Image (cartoon, grey):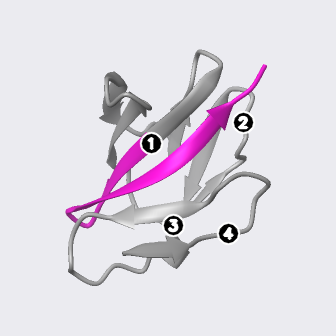
Amino acid sequence: MTYQFVPYSCDSTWLITSTNEIDVKKVKIYPNPTNERVYIDGIDSEIEYQLCALGGQIIKQGSTYNKTVNIENTGLYILKLKVDGIWIFKRIIKIE
């Protein structure tokens, strides 16, 4: 399944890893592209995340802090968020 999330200048496709219902429209990640960090709206508490390179290598993982994820190096990443027990994926661009 794919869902069109929010029309940004980059691709905003969500990939759902479960058939359980989840309202991804409530989860918003911005700004994208970003200079340093992305903010996550639509969640009630801190959540588990993984920041991965396009090749699948985990660059960084943990729990969000103040509903944000810091991205240190310039590049294209996949941000995996575990929301209500379901992993969702979002492409993130980090620019200088």
Real-space Cα separation, disc 3 to disc 4, in angstroms: 10 Å
- Magenta region includes residue 87: yes
In the rendered structure, which amino acid carries the disc numbered 4?
Val
**Which residue, as the protein is rendered here, is positioned at the far top?**
73
What residue sits 74% from the left and 67% below the top? 7
Q: Position of residue 91 (x, y in %)?
A: 54, 46
In the rendered structure, which amino acid carries the disc numbered 2?
Thr
Real-space Cα separation, disc 4 to disc 1, in angstroms: 16 Å
Looking at marks 1 and 2 on the same chain, the residue that comes earlier in the sequence is marked by: 2
> Which numbered disc covers residue 79?
1
> Which numbered disc covers residue 70?
none
> Which numbered disc covers residue 6?
4
What residue sits 53% from the left and 77% below the top? 25
In the rendered structure, which amino acid carries the disc numbered 1?
Leu
Neighbor class of circle 2 (other Cα within 10 Å; few <14, some 14-19, many 20+) is some
Q: Which residue is mark 3?
A: 27
- In screen coordinates, is 29 left or right of 14? right
Eyeballing the image, is 35 above or below 63?
Answer: above
Eyeballing the image, is 57 above or below 29?
Answer: above
